[in-house]
Amino acid sequence: MSKTKQADGEIHEDQLLNFLVNRLDEEVSLSLANNAEITAEDIYEVLVGACADGTSVSTLCASSQNSPAGNTVLYHLRTKFEPERLERVANTLLRKDLDELLPEQVEVVSDLHLRPYYGDEDDTDGLYHSQAKRGTTAFHAYATLYARVKNKHYTLAVRRLTDGDTASSVLAEFLGLLDGLDLDVKAVYLDREFYDSKCLTLLQAHNHAYVMPVVRWGKTIKQELSEGWSRVIQHDMTAKLDGHSWTVEFPVYIDCTYQNGRYDDHGVARHGYAADAPFIDSPRDARYHYAKRFGIEASYRLSEQSIATTSTQNPVVRLLYVVVSLLLQNVWRYLHWEYVATPRRGGRRLWQWSFKEFINMIQRAAWTALAVRRAVPANRPPDDRFSR
C-alpha cells in the first residue's frame, strides 16, 4: 500500500514572515520620504514580529541589531494613517483570499470587544464609554464581523468604536458591507449588546435570519423569564428616532434547563433568545444555534496571544495592532487550508499545525531577520555550571 503523500514542498519560517510583510505592504501603503533611512517593509517586519512575540515595538527594536529605532517605527505608525482610512484598507486586507475559503452560504457573527482603559480619567477623548466593567467605564472598543465556517471564524471587518457609536449604527454598517459581498447569509448571530429595537428593525429590513439573547428590560420580559417552562412568545419593543416612533415585534424563545442548586430556588435556568430563522423551531434549537457564537471567544483568545503590547493611547496604533492580530489568524487558516492540508478524495486532510506553532515560527523568523540578541554581556566568563 502506498503511503499518502502530504506535500510537494515545504513552507519555511522566513517565508511565512515574507508572506505577511508582503501582504501588508501591498494593501496598507506607507508614503515615506525619498531620503528615509528605512522602508515600509522594515516597519512591517517589526510590526509583525512584535505581534508574534507578544511584546512592544520598542522592546523588540531595543534588543535587535538589524531593526530600525523603535521611536522611528512608532513615529511612522502614528503619523501615516487616519483612522477611517486604516479601517477601509484593513477590511480589504482581512478579506483578501477569503473568497477561496468561504462557501456561497455562511453564518456571520458580530461582536463588540472592549479593552479596559485605566489611564487618566481626564484623558479619555476618543475612547468608548459603556457600563462599568473590570473597574472602568472607558474602553478601547472594537466591533468585529466574522464569517463562521465549520467552527472556524474568519474576520471580515473590524471597526473602532468611539463615543456616539451605537450598536444599531455599527450593525447598519456591517449589514451594508454584507450586502456588497458575494455571500448568501444563512443567519446573523449577535451578542446582547445588539438587543434593541433599532437593531431588530434593521435585521427585519434586510430580511436576515438572526439569533441573539434578550436582555431583561421591562416588566413583561422579566416576568416571562422568571416563571414557566420552555415556550415561544411574541414580544415587542418601541423604537424612537427623530420624533418618530414605531413598534417592532419578534418571537422570543425561552429555554429552561434544570440545574439543581443554581439559579432560582428550584434550580431552573431560563434563557431567552430573540430569534427568527427557518431552522429554529423550538427553544432548544435557539440555544443550540446561539451556542455557535461562543466560538468567537476562541478568536479573542488567539488575538490576545498575537498582539503587540503598548502603553500608547494613540487610537491608530492600537487599531493597527488589533488588525495585525486578526490578520495573523486569517492568514494561518488560509495557509493551513490551501498549502498544508492534503487534497484527497472525500475532502482535504488537515495536518496538525496549531496557531501557537504558526506564531512561534513567525517569531523565530523575525528574531533571525532583525538579529535579536541571543546573548548578554557578562563581567566574567561562565564557569562549569553553564556546561553539560
Image (tube, rainbow, N blue to C red):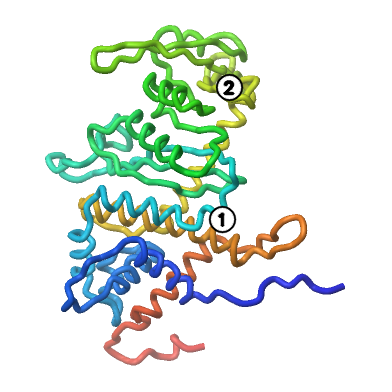
Name the image quarter holding the N terminus.
bottom right
- Please tell me how crowded label 2 is: few (under 14), some (14-19), or many (20+) other residues with Cα within 10 Å: few
In the figure, residue 180 lies in which quadrant?
Answer: top left
Direction from residue 78 to residue 187 in the image, left or right: right
- Residue ID at (37%, 81%): 374
Residue 181: percent from left, percent from top:
47, 43
Direction from residue 295 to residue 57 in the image, left or right: left
Dot 1: element: helix
Label 2 or label 1, whichever comes before in sequence order: 1
Residue pointed to by mark 2: 261
- Residue ID at (38%, 33%): 171
Q: Given the image, on which type of amino acid does mark 1 rest?
A: Glu
- Residue ID at (61%, 20%): 283
Dot 2: element: loop
In-front residue for pair 386/335: 335
- Please tell me how crowded label 1 is: few (under 14), some (14-19), or many (20+) other residues with Cα within 10 Å: few
Residue 6: percent from left, percent from top:
69, 71
Q: Is residue 245 above or below residue 280?
A: above
- Residue ID at (56%, 20%): 269
- Label placed on residue 223: none
Residue pointed to by mark 1: 100
Residue 196: percent from left, percent from top:
39, 21
In-front residue for pair 123/22: 22
In the figure, residue 385 lies in which quadrant?
Answer: bottom left
Q: Given the image, on which type of amino acid does mark 2 rest?
A: Gly
